[in-house]
Amino acid sequence: MHPAKKRVSRKAITAWLFLAPSLLVLGGFTLYPMIQAAYLSLTDYNLIRAAKWVGLDNYAELFGDDAFWNAFGNTVLYAAVVTPATIVLALALALFLDRQFVGRAFVRTAIFLPFIVSLGIIAIAWAFLLDPNIGLVSYWLSQIGIVAEQGVLSDPRWAMPAVMFVGVWKNVGFYMVIYLAGLQSIPEELREAARLDGANAWQRFRNVTLPLLSNQTMLVSVMALIASLQAFDQIYVMTHGGPFFRTETLVMLIYREGFQELRFGYGAAISWVLLLFVLILSITQYGFFQRRQVKY
Amino acid sequence: MTITRNRSYISTRSLTKWLSTLAGIVIALAVLLPIVWMAFTAFKPEADIVTFPPTLWPRELTFEHFQEVWNRIPFAKLYLNTIIFAGSVTVISLLFDSMAAYALARLQFRGSNVVLVGILILLMLPFQVTLIPLYDMLNTVGLTNTLPGLIIPRMTNAFGIFFLRQFFLSLPKDLEEAARVDGASEWRIYARVIMPLAKPALLTLGLFHFQYNWNDLLWPLIMSADVSSATLPAGLALFMGQHVVEYGLLMAGSLLSLLPVVAFFLIIQRSFVAGIATTGLK
């Protein structure tokens, strides 16, 4: 009994030693700052003066702040459009690229490539393409009758669709690869059997392929939702949150309040609202998929 | 009769195939437009860039923007910073992630479930929540505007631990048991048995870490207000804010900054697809 117990504990020590570096870094640079953010959100702090306790004042201010509600609304709008658009497009592209044809490997690589490159950098090229005077896409759009006089990115109606489009463009290839891996794991016999039973292409997709991809769909939707709630890079480069704050998302607002206005306490309060929002949505989403999975 | 039907079947099939190829190439070119545009513009003379109507093809080729970018922007410094930042984060976090994943996947100990759940929760949390305190913390110890300040908080990653744990779980127990019977230590089993088997997963995760940090904008933007520790995306984005018109220069710099990640991806492409297909991303 005794030696066995001793062996178990030595094993446990080994396990904790393997975990130690990661736990120290995660604890010190993720968990601790997260808790610290909760504390800062209850203070007035600008990096220079010591933090002054203000209780729930920041949150009270937040809920009466038009800038916050604007950013919150923009974030919800962005996520509500970009998340489903990315998922549907990723699935459609995966189904298309699951077929055999000449040049398939090239097309797959091309669609995946935006995920590899920096959005902060490639957004510079997008801004250039949409430049009202010398941009190629602006020119093409004007040829088909869409003219934004100050340019798409300065037009309150078009700026948000433009940054949304770039957001979808960036990530769709990655989710497509996940769907492709899923499609390859579906045995061909299942679809063949459905075909012999007289199911048409849509019925085979709806009743065989789609249910068998539910794991991928869950993963892709959780990841795509979290990513779209954190949209920043292309917005920072292309519009800086403008015009008239039309593209200012919560992360843009955290950046502006925290690092430009130096209102650290207020910025931390916005961060915590974002955190709670992400958590509630992710848990709801997870619950939704768990229930659906039981059905099959 | 049969032959004709058969033939027409074959020809519709090959027609669909050709249509697929055509559609595929159109999609690929549309997706690649900004990258192709960037590449062509980098070689266009300034006069060609500002001409109207704009054209995709350069009428004339020039290398002036590539020469200029080294003089006008501290480009070499930005480049070197980005290599050090993304490179060391990738290497260190692959080590730390894989060690933690080994403990969680292959060693039984009390509390492993608690650790795993904790990591899964951290996986969901937006890192922006930590930005302000993290900046404050590193500022207090004088690590803002330094490369270590950029690197240290990124030395491990909840996603990486989870990703490798899923892969390690799929490996057979036999080899490891044999080594254990031979008296090998856990460290040795990790380094000599598990790690070599995990090569596709490690390369895939390595690409994720490398591209994520190479490309990251928000973190270096906040941490590095001056050029001594700024990275390419932050440096170029700041330059764009100050000198909007010099697109030729920006495109040349941008193009050069995309090359390493694209090269990395093309080199490990095969392992990458295998890594996605065999790991927990199922």
Image: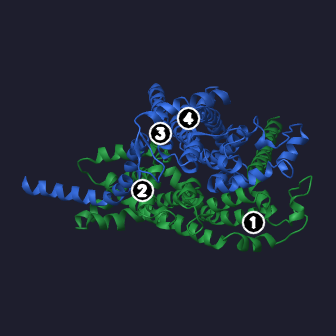
Cβ atoms at labels 3 and 1 below 8 Å apart: no
Residue type (three-letter) at the residue carrying disc 1: Ala
Query: Which numbered disc flags the more N-terminal residue, 2 or 1?
Result: 2
Q: Nearer the viewer, mark 4 or mark 3?
A: 3
Work out how far the residue at label 1 is from the one at label 4, CA to CA, in angstroms: 51 Å
Give the residue drawn at x 48%, y 30%.
A60
Image coordinates for residue A234, horizontal then vertical, percent = 66, 48
Residue type (three-letter) at the residue carrying disc 4: Leu
What residue is pinned by disc 3?
Answer: A269
What residue is pinned by disc 2?
Answer: B137
Q: Which quarter of the image is occupied by the N terminus of chain B?
A: top right
What residue is pinned by disc 4?
Answer: A190
Cβ atoms at labels 2 and 1 below 8 Å apart: no
Q: Secondary structure at mark 2?
A: helix
Work out how far the residue at label 4 is from the one at label 2, CA to CA, in angstroms: 56 Å
Toward the viewer: A163 or A45?
A45
Residue type (three-letter) at the residue carrying disc 3: Ala
Work out how far the residue at label 2 is from the one at label 1, CA to CA, in angstroms: 36 Å
Work out how far the residue at label 4 is from the one at label 3, CA to CA, in angstroms: 51 Å
Cβ atoms at labels 4 and 2 below 8 Å apart: no
